[in-house]
């Protein structure tokens, strides 16, 4: 007999036990592990997708910020360039102004020096002329300069035209204060008397006089009263001399060309 | 000459006996259970895992895929029964390379027991899926006249399952035994290799047929494909 029914029953039982064992030790653990791993992979993929999305978003944000930053930088550079340009222009203007001011100051100083030199030359010339005249008169004619000058002033007063004499006479009459006689030197009493007499005769009145010394007129005598003035000095001679000297000095400077102006 | 390991009796007391079929079956059960226990002891859900775990996962997922291909929608529900059928028969066939081992599937008692298990499992799965009435109704389709033919079909296919497996496994062992007596060593080795192949094929056929029968019992509940326009 090929079939043993006891064995059939036993094998069926064995098979059922094996099914249980396999379910317990093989299928369930393996399927659970597979499911868990699949879930884990799915979670990781989802996580990766989320990260990618975040990364993409951050990348876009970064690119946007970068572009914004570039734009800001370019704007700032342009602004800085403009400011530097305007600042440069301002500095150049300032420097030009300062240079102009310096130039003007230097010119002023030069003019002032020229003037001072001029004045000192005039003063010195007056003194020298005066000294030479004095010495010449004393040595050759035996008279003092002051004496001659007083005499000349007196004679000039008397030789005045009528209009000028009239105006001066009015001034002397209307003046409350005594008329002023200024001279470059101290007038001795004799000459004061000569002058007093000459004035009295000229204006036909007893004119009160006050005598003062003024070294700046170098040599000469002035009569002033209430704004009217009669003067005689060597200043006129000196003026002619100065004009002659100036012409002499101007001649060599004329051919020289003025220096080119430096452009700004 | 011994046709079946049933005849190899180790111990007997009345009707109870411990023959080669039962002992070899226990051996296979022990091998499978202990092997599964040892391998699944350190299962990991990490991406990096052991070779043995990989092997088990390949076997289990391949079986799941086969069951799904047959038409069963929830393979995890059937893998316990169908997978164990395959593993038992495949292991029995593989173990034929061990000298002295006789496959329990070469015994008609074993194949009959397995075929009976299939005979009982098919209506059980069918009833659990569509209820007693629904399942019994399937025997009277398309008409009541078909009822005896359906019953005959059910019995005959069970008989066919049992005899097919028995015939193939027994013949393999038998041919080997005969050849060992008349030919040199080289030829039986080729026959052993051929036996391994037929054993694996038979295990596959038995399991797939069982899956097909179960799927047929549950076929009324399969979702209908949408009408093509």
Image (tube, coloured by chain):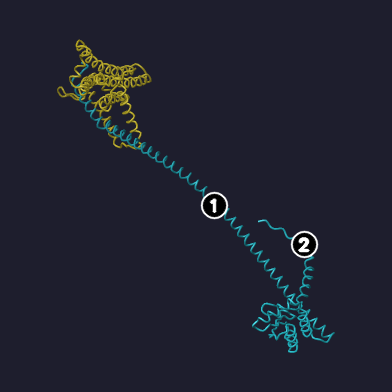
Chain colours: A cyan, B yellow
Judged left or right of residue A57, residue A131 is right
Judged left or right of residue A258, residue B7 is left
* B219, B229: nearer the viewer: B229
- Alpha-carbon span between mark 2 and mark 1: 48 Å
B222 w.r.t. A261: above or below: above
B107 w.r.t. A170: above or below: above
Q: Position of residue A21 (x, y in %)?
A: 24, 30
Q: Give the chain letter at badge 1.
A: A
Q: Position of residue B107 (x, y in %)?
A: 25, 20
Quadrant of the image occupied by residue B121: top left
Q: Position of residue B40 (x, y in %)?
A: 29, 34
Q: How many marks?
A: 2
The N terminus of chain A: image quadrant: top left
Q: Which mark is residue A225?
A: none
Q: Are marks 2 and 1 in contact (CB under 8 Å)?
A: no
Quadrant of the image occupied by residue B128: top left
Earlier along the polypeptide chain: callout 2 or callout 1?
1
Q: Give the chain letter at badge 2.
A: A
What residue is disc 2 on? A256
What residue is disc 1 on? A80
Please identify the residue farthest to the left as the structure is shown: B14
């Amino acid at each position: 007999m090929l079939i043993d029914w006891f064995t059939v029953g036993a094998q069926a039982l064995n098979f059922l036990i094996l099914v249980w064992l396999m379910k317990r030790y093989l299928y369930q653990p393996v399927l659970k592990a597979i499911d868990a791993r699949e879930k884990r992979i799915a979670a990781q993929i989802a996580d990766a997708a989320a990260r990618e999305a975040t990364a993409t978003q951050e990348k876009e944000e970064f690119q946007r910020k970068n572009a914004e930053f570039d734009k800001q930088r370019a704007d700032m550079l342009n602004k800085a360039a403009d400011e530097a340009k305007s600042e440069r222009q301002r500095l150049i203007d300032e420097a030009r102004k300062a240079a102009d001011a310096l130039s003007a100051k230097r010119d002023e100083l030069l003019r002032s020096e020229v003037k001072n030199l001029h004045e000192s030359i005039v003063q010195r010339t007056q003194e020298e002329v005066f000294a030479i005249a004095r010495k010449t008169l004393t040595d050759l004619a035996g008279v003092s300069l002051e004496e001659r000058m007083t005499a000349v002033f007196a004679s000039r007063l008397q030789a005045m035209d009528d209009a000028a004499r009239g105006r001066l006479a009015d001034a002397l009459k209307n003046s409350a204060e005594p008329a002023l006689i200024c001279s470059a030197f101290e007038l001795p009493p004799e000459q004061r008397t000569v002058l007093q007499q000459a004035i009295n005769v000229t204006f036909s009145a007893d004119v009160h006089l006050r005598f003062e010394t003024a070294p700046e007129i170098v040599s000469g005598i002035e009569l002033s009263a209430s704004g009217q003035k009669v003067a005689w000095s060597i200043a006129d001679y000196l003026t002619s001399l100065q004009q002659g000297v100036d012409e002499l000095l101007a001649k060599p400077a004329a051919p020289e060309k003025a220096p080119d102006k430096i452009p700004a | 000459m011994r046709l079946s390991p049933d005849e190899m009796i180790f111990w007997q007391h009345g009707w109870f006996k411990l023959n080669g079929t039962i002992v070899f079956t226990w051996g296979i059960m022990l091998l499978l259970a202990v092997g599964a226990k040892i391998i699944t002891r350190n299962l990991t859900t990490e991406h990096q895992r052991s070779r043995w775990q990989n092997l088990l996962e390949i076997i289990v997922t391949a079986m799941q895929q086969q069951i799904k291909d047959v038409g069963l929608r929830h393979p995890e529900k059937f893998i316990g029964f169908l997978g164990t059928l395959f593993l038992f028969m495949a292991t029995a066939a593989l173990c034929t390379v061990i000298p002295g081992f006789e496959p329990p599937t070469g015994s008609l008692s074993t194949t009959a027991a397995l075929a009976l298990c299939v005979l009982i499992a098919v209506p059980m799965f069918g009833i659990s899926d569509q209820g007693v009435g629904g399942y019994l109704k399937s025997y009277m389709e398309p008409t009541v006249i078909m009822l005896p033919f359906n019953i005959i079909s059910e019995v005959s296919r069970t008989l066919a399952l049992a005899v097919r497996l028995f015939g193939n496994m027994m013949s393999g062992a038998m041919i080997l035994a005969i050849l060992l007596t008349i030919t040199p060593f080289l030829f039986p080795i080729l026959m052993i290799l051929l036996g391994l192949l037929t054993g694996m094929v038979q295990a596959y056929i038995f399991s797939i047929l069982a899956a097909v029968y179960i799927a047929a019992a549950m076929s009324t509940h399969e979702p209908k494909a949408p009408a093509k326009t």
